Amino acid sequence: MATYIPSPVDWVRKQVEKYEGSGGTQGTTLLDTGLPVIIVTHVGHKTGAIRKTPLMRVKDANSYVLVGSQGGAPKDPAWVHNLRLKPDVEVRDETAVQPMRVREVADEAERSRLWRLAVAAYPPYEDYQKRTSRRIPVFVAEPTKTAA
Ligand code: F42
């Protein structure tokens, strides 16, 4: 079985511990904002280790939009590379956990629609895009199984 490697960033690791440790009943929002967060469990493309990344919850019907903003940092977060190479993930939204497959959104019309949804859910994304010259990657996570 693959090893789980927690985030090296203290506040992120603590959020994952609280969220997962409570079965999705605590630690489910971003500090100070009260806005909902999901946990994306994925696989490191170099280490093969299990990684858990909290992201803002941006819902689009049964799918989730994942935004690689990292506060407008100059480089894409490491999880973006993992998802490009290993798109099978698990998404926890509070108490619901489901297997999903991720794809990066390349189509401009689709990306604009999803970007608007993302900014509506978490307005700082707009400032994060202004802060960096890289184009913030946008992914969509879609269910791999239809509910019975
Ligand atoms: N980040 C976002 O980009 N978008 C969001 O909407 C967002 C919301 C959010 C809400 C709550 C919260 O607690 C955190 C939130 N974050 C959000 C931050 C997010 O959870 C990540 O911490 C952030 O995006 C940085 O991602 P990262 O994958 O770069 O994390 C770093 C700190 C990290 O874990 N680095 C590891 C390390 O050891 O330095 C590497 C992890 C890794 O995946 N390694 C790969 C492997 O094989 O295991 C290799 C990767 C490679 O290409 O080298």
Image: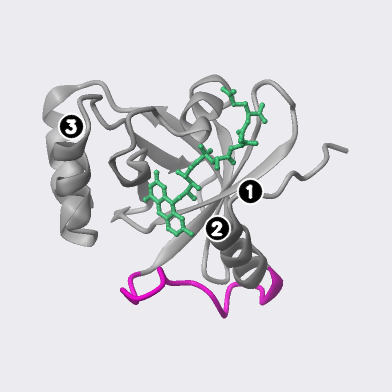
Residue 30 lies in the magenta-colored region: yes
Label 3 lies in ligand 1 vicinity (Cβ under 8 Å): no
Query: Is 22 situated left or right of 118 in this image?
Result: right
The residue type indicated by label 1 comes to Ser
Q: Which residue is mark 1?
A: 7
- Mark 2 Cα-neighbour bin, 10 Å: few <14, some 14–19, many ≥20: some
Q: Which residue is mark 3?
A: 110
Query: Is 132 situated left or right of 101 in this image?
Result: left
Q: Position of residue 97 (x, y in %)?
A: 59, 59
How far apart are the two marked residues, 2 and 1, measured between alpha carbons?
A: 7 Å
- Mark 3 Cα-neighbour bin, 10 Å: few <14, some 14–19, many ≥20: few
- State which tag comes first along the sequence, 2 or 1: 1
Q: Pointer 2 and pointer 1: residues touching (CB < 8 Å)?
A: yes
Q: Which residue is mark 2?
A: 12
Q: Position of residue 61 (x, y in %)?
A: 30, 54
- Answer above or below: position of 81 versus 27: above
The residue type indicated by label 2 comes to Val
Please tell me which residue is depicted at 12% across the width and 35% down the height of the picture: 112
Please tell me which residue is depicted at 41% across the width and 28% down the height of the picture: 103
Q: Quadrant of residue 113?
A: top left
- State which tag comes first along the sequence, 3 or 2: 2
Q: Quadrant of residue 104?
A: top left
Which SS class for mark 3?
helix
- Answer above or below: position of 123 versus 45: below
Label 1 lies in ligand 1 vicinity (Cβ under 8 Å): yes
- Total numbered badges shown on the rendered structure: 3
* Residue placed most toward the observer, 28 or 71: 71
* Residue placed most toward the observer, 86 or 56: 56
How far apart are the two marked residues, 1 and 3, measured between alpha carbons?
A: 31 Å
Label 2 lies in ligand 1 vicinity (Cβ under 8 Å): yes
Q: Which residues are magenta?
A: 21-35
